[in-house]
Image: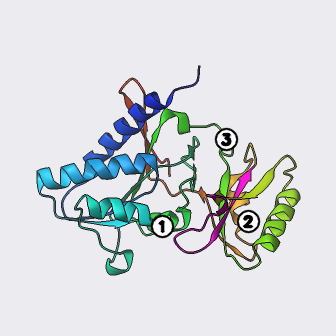
Amino acid sequence: MPENNSNKDIGKKIAAEEALNFVHSEMVIGLGTGSTAKIFVDLLSQKYFKENLNIKVLATSSSTEFQSKSLGLPITSIDTVNYVDLTIDGADEVDSDLNLLKGGGGALLQEKIMASYSKKMIVIVDNSKVVTNLGKFPLPIEIVKFGSKCTQKQIENTLLELGYSDFSINFRKENGDYFVTDEKHFILDLSLKKITDPYILDKKIKKVVGVVETGLFINMASSVIIGNNDGSFKLIEHKG
């Protein structure tokens, strides 16, 4: 029987609460985007005021920035810091190697920049996001607006060359129009059902001119906290 949303919310909150244990004073903390990351930001604000933490926080999207500011968190920009100690973010899918599929919230580019600049990335998910193979959730690809349909065709050709046949590529829409990211790009959602080799797919798609970034986060997560609907959690560290 599939989990209902309330059960998933329990898992999300459990994972977010456990991630708080990794937050300490004197840290620069990257904040992700999405429903689970949103829960973490709420909890972080409570910890910040309760423990009078000396921290700086960075946002991966305009929505997370707005939330952080409204909660009184000391937000700054990534270009003003020398490093990021810790990024806490969610994911749309996580496989057994801790590779991630992200971008359902439309902030994959900023999220990947933040993750690549971080000493450690902790991913928080409910157990419904854990998969054997990535790809059931549509893979977001951020592309520039100019020649976007040409880029779409080039990605389609790349997928055919890689042996994918049963797939679809659609421009993400919002309120009947093209969804536009914070960086003023479009997003293509690739419905592949199953990604056979995330590393190769990521590498090949990024070679297409017009592609800015993919939603595949390969070897970027330091650890994953999986929250269960019974109130338990599991911490998995990256083997590398």
The 10 Å Cα crowd at callout 1, few under 14, some 14 to 19, many 20 or more, is: some
- Residue type at mark 2 is Ile
Considering every residue shown, the one lying at the far front of the view is 176
Q: Choose between 219 and 175: the one closer to the eye.
A: 175
Q: Mark on residue 116?
A: 1
Relative to 84, is 104 above or below? above
Left or right of 167, for residue 227: left
Q: What stretch is highlighted in magenta?
A: 174-191
Q: Residue at x 19, y 55 (%)?
A: 48
Task: Answer with mark 3 or mark 1, whichever residue precedes in sequence.
Answer: 1
Disc 2 secondary structure class: helix
Q: What residue is shown with label 2?
A: 205
Name the residue nearer the viewer: 103 or 146.
Answer: 146
Q: Residues within 10 Å of mark 3 (few under 14, many from 20)?
A: some
Where's residue 217, x and y in %?
A: 57, 57
* Count of labels in the image: 3
Q: Label 3 amino acid?
A: Asn
| Rendering coords of residue 80 (x, y %) | 32, 80
Residue 180 falls inside the magenta stretch:
yes
Of the image marks 1 and 2, the number of the one nearer the N terminus = 1
Residue 119 in sight from this viewpoint: no
Does the residue at mark 3 contact the one at mark 2 (Cβ under 8 Å)?
Answer: no
Secondary-structure class at tag 3: loop
Vertical arrangement, residue 230 with respect to residue 68, above or below: above
Looking at the image, tell me whether mark 3 or mark 2 is earlier in sequence order: 3
Q: Is residue 165 above or below residue 29?
A: above
Q: Given the image, on which type of amino acid does mark 1 rest? A: Ser
Residue 133 circle label: 3
Residue 154 image point, x, y percent: 83, 69
